Image: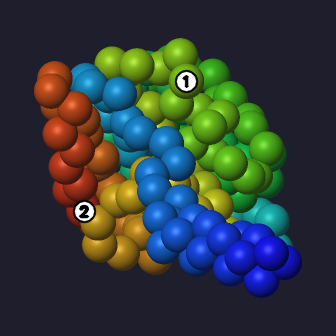
């Protein structure tokens, strides 16, 4: 009897492991998510190159209809988002540095969002959304993630700045 209980329990664990976690979050139809890493830094401050990159990001997104801008509380992230916020006349909303998709996607269906993150939260965001290809982890990478009206998600990778 004990052996059957053990085997049944072990089988259930194997099946649960095979199932995998699946997508942890999804982009709602009509939603656009811009994902970018902060500019070049020295400690928590942007370098001269980082400031130039932040300004280049504002130019790259000047014509994009952005509804909300999200960032961590790190100064380098907020400084990277600041020129975009000025051009778009938006506030930078800071959120904790984990579970980004769960923090910024609910309530933002069919909107355009900008996430200014770092390596430590962009990769998990990418994974949570089950997005294809590499996450935009290099300075100057800009991912445009769109869910069309039927919910089909596409990823367009762009470069900005020098």
Quadrant that contains the N terminus: bottom right
159 to 103, vertically: above or below:
below
Q: Label 1, secondary structure: give it.
A: loop
Q: Which of the two discs, 1 and 2, sits closer to the camera?
A: 1
Examine the rendering and report whether any part of residue 65 can be seen. Answer: no
Question: What residue lies at 20% left-to-right and 56% top-to-bottom?
Answer: 156
Q: Quadrant of residue 158?
A: bottom left
Question: What residue lies at 64% left-to-right and 61% top-to-bottom?
Answer: 121
Q: Residues within 10 Å of mark 2 (few under 14, many from 20)?
A: some
64 to 136, vertically: above or below:
above
Examine the rendering and report whether any part of residue 3 can be seen. Answer: yes
161 to 68, vertically: above or below:
below
Q: Which colour scheme is used?
A: rainbow
- Name the residue that disc number 1 marks: 106
Q: Residue 63: x percent and y percent?
A: 24, 30
Q: Residue 149: x percent and y percent?
A: 16, 23
Q: In whole angstroms, how far apart are the C-alphas of marks 1 and 2?
A: 24 Å
């Amino acid at each position: 009897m004990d052996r059957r209980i053990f085997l049944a329990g072990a089988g259930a664990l194997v099946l649960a492991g095979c199932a995998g976690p699946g997508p942890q979050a999804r982009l709602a139809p009509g939603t656009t998510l811009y994902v970018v890493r902060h500019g070049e830094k020295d400690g928590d401050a942007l370098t001269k190159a980082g400031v130039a990159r932040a300004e280049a990001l504002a130019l790259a997104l000047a014509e994009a209809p952005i509804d909300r801008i999200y960032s961590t509380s790190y100064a380098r992230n907020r400084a990277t988002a600041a020129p975009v916020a000025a051009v778009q006349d938006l506030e930078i909303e800071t959120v904790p540095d984990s579970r980004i998709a769960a923090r910024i996607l609910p309530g933002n269906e069919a909107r355009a969002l900008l996430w200014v993150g770092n390596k430590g939260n962009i990769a998990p965001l990418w994974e949570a959304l089950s997005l294809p290809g590499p996450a935009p982890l290099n300075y100057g990478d800009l991912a445009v993630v769109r869910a069309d009206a039927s919910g089909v998600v596409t990823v367009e990778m762009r470069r900005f700045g020098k």
